[in-house]
Amino acid sequence: MRAELILKKYGKIVDAALDRFLGKPRFPSVLHKSMRYSLFAGGKRLRPILAILTAQACSAPYSRVLPAACGLEMIHTYSLIHDDLPAMDNDDMRRGIPTCHVKFGEAAAILAGDALLTKAFELIALNGRVKGVTPAAAVNAAAEIGAAAGADGMVGGQVVDMLFEGRRVTPKELSFIHSHKTGALITASITAAAMLAGAGEAKIRHFRGFGEKIGLAFQIADDILDITGDEKKLGKTKGKDLKAGKATYPGLFGIEKSREKAENLVLEALRISGKIGNNKGVRALSELARFFVSRTY
């Protein structure tokens, strides 16, 4: 199945689950409206879909990981809300519509992000009640996601990204930023799902390696699209990273070498996926890996 069809099929499943888990808007209405506004503002739902496909690659039903998968999307959305704030990236548009703080104000946006983050871990914890999930798997998956989202993962990467604005970085420093800022949560989406699906330690190591490769490839592709992409497809202002002096692969290596690096990372990921198996879930994960570097949005 082509990547676009995979995203469309499972994106509908994720959207329905997010709607159910978040519940109807209630008091205080500005909080729930701002949470919903950002959560349902579009997006590819890559992280929850990677979790779902990983469960299938482990021959488990996607229901085994669905609460945690939705939690991962909430963590991702909270990070975007906070990244867009004036104190951070100061973006007015996200996915073709005004950012949360532009629509609802900075205070409401900060609190919406906070609420999505805490709701995410409520869902991740509740995944331990799902039939077939062992207590140990639930705890390990929660710890995996928590580490990836925090100071040793996404948040840490974002801080280093800010510290290095306008500075020349080394390849090692750039890899640290990208593998933490973006790659960590992508890797955790796969690894935590494998844990919840009951994979053994050896298979979990393969899934982790696969996630690390495609997570870094995804961010390199994002760097390239920031320069070459179509603003209408991207749904955000093009060239902002370049203007802000952010550390990017094209800025250090140029576009062609960056594209080659991303493609090589995907080839390495595909070699790892061959060690996992060849069922429907593995093939779908491999198809998404290829999409990570061929996408135009």
Image (tube, rainbow, N blue to C red):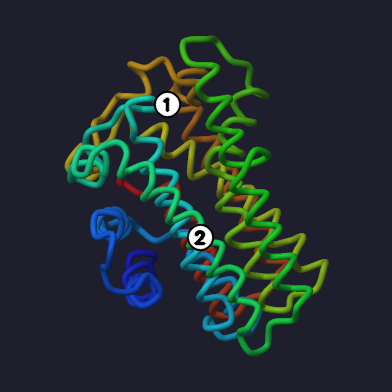
Judge left or right: residue 195 versus residue 61. Answer: right
Residue designated by label 1: 255
Instruction: Work out how far the residue at label 2 is from the one at label 1, CA to CA, in angstroms.
Output: 30 Å
Q: Is residue 39 left or right of residue 273?
A: left
* Near-viewer residue (214 or 258): 214
Residue 88's tag is none
Name the residue carrying label 2.
Answer: 72
Front in this rendered view, residue 147 or 231:
147
Secondary structure found at label 2: helix
- Mark 2 or 1: in front is 2
> Which badge, 2 or 1, comes first in the chain's sequence?
2
Q: Quadrant of residue 169?
A: top right
Q: Position of residue 232 (x, y in %)?
A: 17, 42
Residue at 61% over, 53% down? 187
Q: How many marks?
A: 2
Q: Are marks 2 and 1 in contact (CB under 8 Å)?
A: no
User: Looking at the rendering, in which quadrant would you find the N terminus?
Assistant: bottom left
Task: Write the residue at 19% across / 45% down.
Answer: 96
Name the side, left or right, on which 268 lies relative to 74: right
Left or right: 60, with 22 as reference point: right
Tell me what residue is drawn at x 51 percent, y 76 percent.
Answer: 66
The image quadrant that residue 8 belongs to is bottom left
- Disc 1, SS: helix
Residue at 62% x, 69% y is: 193
Question: Where 143 sits versus 99, above or below?
Answer: below
Residue 20 at x, y = what percent?
A: 36, 78
* Neighbour tally class for label 1: few under 14, some 14-19, many 20 plus, Cα within 10 Å: some
**Relative to residue 195, is residue 115 depicted above or below?**
above
Decide if residue 206 is in sight here: yes
Can the viewer see residue 1 in this picture? no
